[in-house]
Amino acid sequence: MTYNGGGYILNMGHSKRGLPTFFRKMIVPRWLDDLTRVIFIEASLYNPNINAVIVVSLMVERLATHNYLTDAQIGLMKPLTSSTMDMYDMTFKYFLFLLLIILYVVQLIYSSRYGTLKISFFYDVLILVLTIVTCTYFYQYGTCLSGTFKFYQSSVQVSQEQGRIGFKQHVSFTYCYDLLLIYQSWLAMLTLLLLCRFIKLLQFTPFRFLSAFKSFNLKLFFSTPICLLSRICSLVCVTSVKSKIHFICNDTDFTLNFHR
């Protein structure tokens, strides 16, 4: 079955026994011949047993030297379901939430005792920017996955002849997986910056910490608006942003997308 994107779709079912037959069928309409240089293979699989989407992208390129250049990418995405209400990476976000609280309290106590921290403004602005960017990509990832699943469900059709599930058109999760990788990269940079900031603030001894706590000045709490804004946005965004992903899907068939 062809589709508007200029490719070829085949539902492999629940086994690999039909793969040789599939390639023979592709040779007949000359989808694969001596002039073929690059083949992209994309497989999207949803497994309800583990509540995860498996995305596999394969690329085979035949070079002028008659050698082959291959590239493979395998990704796993765990969405939010209405039954469990488990957010993706929830444990890690709890850790980040705790780290932000400790960082904010320590910074307030340190500022009340020793005055303004060096380059505090730069760190706070950078943390705020990274937090906003991270949450933006997380929201885009959740929206993409939600919309793709709706499209995935609408494209599913049951074959009355064989009693197997097929697809009206190709559904790709590759873009959602790319957004997930970008989100994880920004989250890693944000976490690294928070850890560096946290270690920098803990360079004074516990005795100095106690003396600073005794002389805590509440006025300094409002003297650093950027600091306050960055902490509030970090605590609210990182822990409260939830992707609206609700779906019911039980088929486990592969959908292969071939491009030349």
Image (spheres, rainbow, N blue to C red):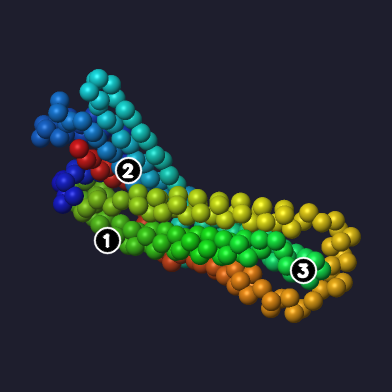
In the picture provided, is 113 more to the left or to the right than 77? Answer: right
Q: CA distance from mark 3 to mark 1?
A: 60 Å
| Residue sitting nearer the eye, 227 or 168 | 227
Local crowd at mark 2 within 10 Å, few (<14), some, or many (≥20)? many
Q: Nearer the viewer, mark 3 or mark 2?
A: 3
Instruction: Describe the element under mark 1 as helix, strand or loop.
Output: helix
Q: Report the disc number at residue 154.
A: 1
Give the residue displayed 86% in from the left and 61% down from the top.
Answer: 208
Instruction: Describe the element under mark 2 as helix, strand or loop.
Output: strand
Q: Report the disc number at residue 115.
A: 3
Instruction: Describe the element under mark 3 as helix, strand or loop.
Output: loop
Give the residue displayed 70% in from the left and 56% down from the top.
Answer: 198
Residue underneath mark 2: 43
Q: CA distance from mark 3 to mark 2?
A: 57 Å
Q: Point out the tag, 3 or 2, that comes first from the N-terminus.
A: 2
Give the residue displayed 41% in from the left and 54% down from the top.
Answer: 179
Q: Is residue 238 visible?
A: no
Decide: marks 1, 2 in contact (CB < 8 A)? no
Where residue 62 sits, quadrant-wise, is top left
Q: Point out the tag, 1 or 2, that comes first from the N-terminus.
A: 2
Task: Give, as a three-letter code, the residue at label 2.
Answer: Ala
| Residue sitting nearer the eye, 191 or 120 | 120
